[in-house]
Amino acid sequence: MKSYIRVLAIITALVMFQGLFTKPAAAQPSSVSFQVFYDQLSPYGQWINHPNYGYVWIPDAGPDFAPYSSNGYWVLTDYGWTWSSDYEWGWAPFHYGRWDFDNYYGWFWIPDNEWGPAWVTWRRAEGYYGWEPMGPGITIGMSFGNNYNNYNHHWTFVNDRYFGRNDLNRYYVNQNDHERIFRNSTIINNTYNDNRRQIKYVSGPERTEVRKVTGRNISPVTFQENSVPGQKVQNGVFRTYRPDVRSNKGDQKPPSPARVTNVQDVRKPSERNSSGLQNKNTGQQQQNSTKQQPPAERQNTVNKQNETNQQNAVKQQNAINQQNALDRQKEAQKQFTIKQQEAVKRQNEITRQNAEKQQNNTKQQQDVVKQQTNTRQQQDVVKQQTNTRQQQDVVKQQTNTKQQQDVVKQQTNTRQQQDVVKPQNNTKQQNVVKPQNNTKQQNVTKQTDVKTNTTTKKEEH
């Protein structure tokens, strides 16, 4: 019994000793909310409350910034052509959500929870590759349709032999040639199915085709997920932060940016710096100066700040209302324009149908005329054949008549010959009779002479 207790005590001690020096197992990372976007991107741009999309982000990336064009390049991964951005924040806006363009704000990003190698539409022209960011609400199937791929100024084209280089931005085609290239291009609809996430991605140009046009060996880089925000390509490995972002639906308290810029206070693209660090430093300085103030002054500062925030909220709400009114006006104008276009389209369709109907009638008339002409030609042929036959009959009849005449003539000649022969026969007969008579006469004469001679002889005797 004592041995059993001793063994049990030793086992208990070992278990406790192991528990003291063993680290607890790391918990599996759970999905994150949109708050990760709001927190991670705030130092590099401005969040505004857009009347159509909610919270959208405007990067501090300079006046010439364009998504999937500035400060990055394409690398081939298992998911297809993937955009590798050199921005510190590039892991999020180029792989989640959609980009849109505003004439005042410039480019702004609408968050979404689906990851992708790049949410762009691809096109191929002779000697060129091109791509364009997908707009908000555009799916892959919609981006493959002809109605979506209308030309605009948001395409990036590059000579195909430079595609896949990490200095790709040096070889972009001048924008003046975009429309010409677009007109002669076709959609690239290659896709990749991510069975684990049940998502389809646009994979871009075929690897074998790129290898052929560039003359380089195109080898896919290894894809690897990071546990912290950021992305980088190094030693043939593409490392990026790719969390599972859950939708905001169902959250009791929806996530939101810590600071939302008033719509009227949004800086123009030409006024934004390219680092995104200025706002972060300025905000930190303001917080530090506030902490150093005495309590009473700090309270006054807080009150002023609250009053300013309330005023800003009112201004923002007024701006939102004004923007909503402008949007409603734009929507009404858009609907009116659509109705006009539909009316023009219907009129064009009616004109086209009438033209087709007229063409059909003209064709039918031409067919009738052609048929009548053919009938007339056939009648002429039949008539000609009849005339020929009649002529042949006349010739045949004439020939028969001539033959009959020849027969009659021959018969006449024969009869005439017979008539000529008949008198000759009569003459011959006469001649035959006449000698007989002569002979008879000769015989009579001879008998007479004999008789005379006989008489003479008698007398002589």
Image (spheres, helix red, strand yellow):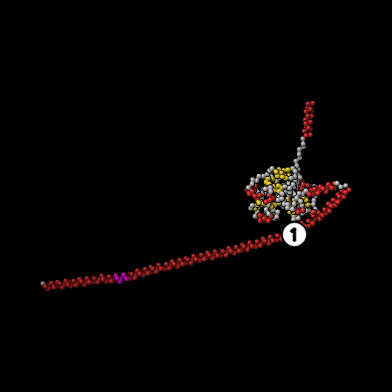
What residue sits right under mark 1 in the picture? 333
Assign a secondary structure to mark 1: helix
User: Which residue type does callout 1 highlight?
Assistant: Gln
Residue 349, placed above or below residue 156: below
Q: Nearer the viewer, residue 352 or 10?
A: 10
Q: Is residue 416 left or right of residue 12?
A: left
Residue shown at the point (66%, 62%) measured from the top left: 351
Mark 1 residue crowding within 10 angstroms, few (<14) / some (14–19) / many (20+): few
Judged by its main secondary structure, the magenta piece is helix
Instruction: Kindly give the residue lying farthest to the right in the view shown.
Output: 296
Bounds of the magenta segment: 420-425
* Spot occupied by residue 227 in the image (x, y as percentages of width and height): 74, 42
* Spot occupied by residue 243 in the image (x, y as percentages of width and height): 74, 44
Q: Nearer the viewer, residue 289 or 125?
A: 289
Q: Nearer the viewer, residue 115 or 214?
A: 214
**Total numbered badges shown on the rendered structure:** 1
